[in-house]
Amino acid sequence: MSAVPARAVALVTGSSRGIGLAVAEALAKEGFAIAVNGPADDSELAAAVARIANHGVPVVAAPFDVGAIGGHKAALDAVEEKLGPLTTLVNNAGVGVLKRGDMLEVSEESWDRCISINAKALFFLSQAFARRLLARERPSLFHSIVNVTSSNAVAVAEQRSEYCASKAAAAMVSKVLAVRLGRENIAVYDVQPGLIATEMTAPVIEAYRDRAAQGLTLFPRVGEPGEVGTLIASLATGRLPYTTGLSIPADAGMLVPRF
Ligand SMILES: NC(=O)c1ccc[n+]([C@@H]2O[C@H](COP(=O)([O-])OP(=O)(O)OC[C@H]3O[C@@H](n4cnc5c(N)ncnc54)[C@H](OP(=O)(O)O)[C@@H]3O)[C@@H](O)[C@H]2O)c1
C-alpha cells in the first residue's frame, strides 16, 4: 500500500469575507486543505466554504469567535479531526474602531475590543497552535504562522488610535513568535496591508482612492484582497526560503520614507 502524501492544512481566521477569504482562496489554489472561520455559523461562512470547495480541496467551516480564548483548543481539535494535522495558521480576523475620532474621546469599550480581537486573540490562538505542533512529529511540510497586522502597526492614523495600538502589539507578538518558534523550524511572518478595498474600508475607500491617486501610495491605486492573498500564499508555501520574523508591507510603497 502506498503512503498517502501529507497535505498542508491551513486555518485562516476571519475568512468569511475580505482579505481572509482571498487568503483562503489563494491557499486552496496551492492545494492546501482549508478551515474557513468567522465568528458565527451563518450564510456568509457557508458561502465562503462553497467558494473554496470549487477549488477541489478539502474544506470545512470552523465557526468560532477568536476572542473567546477558552474555545481555541476545541476549535483546533475540531479542524484537525476533519482535515488532519494543521501546518499553517493565518491570523487575519480583525476589527476596526467603534468610532473614528480624537484619541481624547476613545471609549474603553472600543480600546478593549481592538486589543482583544486584534492582539490578544492572535497571541493565544498562535500559542494554542504552536503547542500542538511542538507536541508532535511534523512531516517535512512547511509550517508557518502568518499574522495580518496593518500599516498602522507602524504609522499613526490619528482617528483610529486604539486600532493602531492593537496592530503594533500584534506586530510585536509576531516577532516574539518568530524568536520562540525559529528553533522549531516554524516560520512566522507579519503582513502589513495598507489600503485594501474590503467591507472594513468601504466607508472610506473613495477617499483612499483619491489619496492613492494623489501619491499617498507609490502605485497610484488601492489594493485588492486577492493581492494580499497571493502574497500570503507565497509565504505559507515557503517561497521565501531561509526567512522568518519578517514584517512585509503590502501597501504599494505607502510607507517608503520620502521628502
Ligand atoms: N482592508 C484594509 O485596508 C486593511 C488594512 C490593514 C489591515 N487590515 C487587516 O486585515 C484583516 C482583514 O480585514 P478586512 O479588511 O478583510 O476586514 P473585513 O472585511 O471586516 O473582514 C473581517 C473578517 O474577520 C471576521 N471576524 C471579525 N471578528 C471576528 C472574531 N471575533 N472571530 C472570528 N472572525 C472574526 C469577520 O467576520 P464577521 O463579518 O462575521 O464579523 C470577517 O470575516 C484585519 O485584521 C484588518 O485589521 C485590513
Image (cartoon, rainbow, N blue to C red):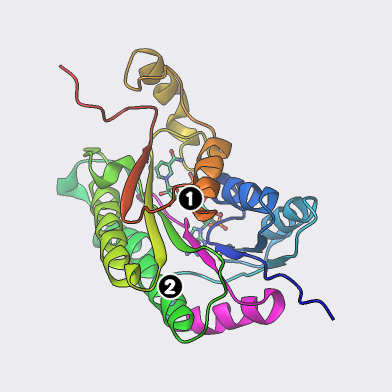
User: For the residue labelled by badge 2, is the local secondary structure a helix, a strand or a loop?
Assistant: helix
| Res 50 quadrant in image | bottom right
Q: Between label 1 and label 2, give the one nearer the viewer.
A: 1
Magenta segment: does it hold 11? no
Q: Position of residue 202 (x, y in %)?
A: 50, 35
Residue 203's label in the rendered image is: none
To which residue does mark 1 refer? 235
Residues drawn in magenta: 70-97
* Crowd class of label 2 (few under 14; some 14 to 19; many from 20; radius 10 Å): many
Please tell me which residue lies in front, 102 or 64.
64
Please tell me which residue lies in front, 157 or 203.
157
Residue 125's label in the rendered image is: 2
Residue at screen point 38% across, 76% down: 127
Please determine whether, in this image, residue 49 is positioned above or below residue 66.
Answer: above
Residue 126 visible at all: yes
Q: Is residue 152 left or right of residue 250?
A: left
Q: Position of residue 156 (x, y in %)?
A: 21, 39
